[in-house]
Image (cartoon, rainbow, N blue to C red):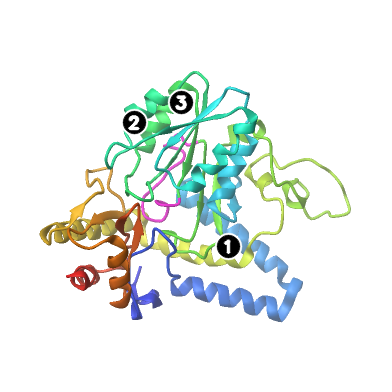
Amino acid sequence: MRRDQFPVTAKWAFFDHAAVAPLPAPAVEALRTYADSLAENGIAAVKQWVDRVAAVRQLAAKLINAPSTDDVYFVPNTTHGISVIAEGFPWQPGDNVVLAAEEYPANQYPWMNLASRGVEVRPVPSVGNRLRIDDIRAALTDRTRVLTVSSVEFASGFRNDLDALGALCRERGVFFFVDAIQSLGVFPLDVQKTPIDALSADGHKWMLGPEGAGFGYIRRAWVERLHPIGVGAFSVVRPFEFSTIDFTLKPHAGRWEGGAPNVPGITALGASLQLLLDTGIPVIERRVLALTDYLCDKALSLGWSVFSSRESGEKSGIVSLLHPNRSPADIVRICRAAGVIVNNRANRVRVSPHAYNTEAEIDQFLDSVR
């Protein structure tokens, strides 16, 4: 991953990849290529773009080590993938779902929307900067059907132990769903090793893609047990035989791709995924953790407080900070004027660098607030 592949660096020290990341040059070129092709050919180029979507599906499957490309489906946003499970799960009145109390709204509202079906939401509050597995275990009951967490909590930056949580779910017979948007692209995830039943992630954060193009995963054993929502022409086994009505759904995650895909978004996402995979996710992880360690050490030396856990296995690409004198809103404003992009979450300064960022940019951020 070369720094010159990121045009944003000419203008900004950009530390807000936990919100909406800037596009790298390969993704911009992919969008341009698609636009030119559509302008010049219309549907005459359709095979080229069907093949491109299939190729990006392979990249997405590789990123999470899915057993098959058929276990991956494209989503317009993380919320869609969450709703596929929330709305399709075989609930019974009195069932419940356990989630983090400080979870991002997209991973709360779809579950809260099940109240009319008699499904209870059981929120588990964090203790300080951690979401403790013992507290999650204590929240599970004999009517818990789903545990849903983010791989990394959006405000605190706490990285959940997905292996341990997955093992807990297997032990208790609970469906395990992961909102993976704050880790995919930076931290390795192997769904054949970690017992995740389903996940969803839009591509516009750490995967460096455009908004509106992401992917989900559903373990094959659950495909027939979930009621399909959003069914359309492309959900069936013969999707291009438009004059033949044969409502035989695809026997895999592809049944949740009902309509026309976001081809420009997917093709740009593919360019970014290729960039990430070519660099190597373990390489990116080491670089991001090195940058955030550097940030925390320097910030502490200047009197800041670091809210995020920096324990091994718990730290992530998100660092939540508090300044001794200035409010987070003031710091965001001051930084913006100084050419630095950070954010304010939970009334703390949230800093989220990617692998192309530098220590010099971190110094620029800290200097701008002095």
Q: Amino acid at mark 3?
A: Arg
Quarter of the picture containing the C terminus is bottom left
| Closer to the camera in the image, 325 or 217 | 325
What residue is shown at x 22% (from left), y 43% (from top)? Answer: 311
- Above or below for 113 versus 3: above
Q: Earlier in the sequence, mark 1 or mark 2?
A: 2
From the top left corner, tell me how far across and down residue 111 is, in percent.
55, 38
| Closer to the camera in the image, 314 or 57 | 314
Q: Nearer the viewer, mark 1 or mark 2?
A: 2
* Badge count: 3
Q: Is residue 192 magenta?
A: yes
Q: Amino acid at mark 2?
A: Ile
Task: Please say whether residue 90 is visible from this viewpoint.
Answer: no
Q: Quadrant of residue 292?
A: bottom left
Q: Quadrant of residue 149?
A: top left
Q: Which mark is residue 266?
A: 1
Task: Please say whether residue 24 is visible from this viewpoint.
Answer: yes
Q: Which residue is mark 3?
A: 170
- Above or below for 62 versus 335: above
Q: Earlier in the sequence, mark 1 or mark 3?
A: 3
Q: Is residue 29 magenta?
A: no
SS type, badge 1: helix
The answer to whether marks 1 and 2 mark residues whose Cβ atoms lie closer than 8 Å is: no
Q: Which residue is mark 2?
A: 133
Mark 1 Cα-neighbour bin, 10 Å: few <14, some 14–19, many ≥20: many
Instruction: Give the CA separation, mark 3 to mark 2.
Output: 14 Å
Q: Which residues are magenta?
A: 181-196
SS type, badge 2: helix
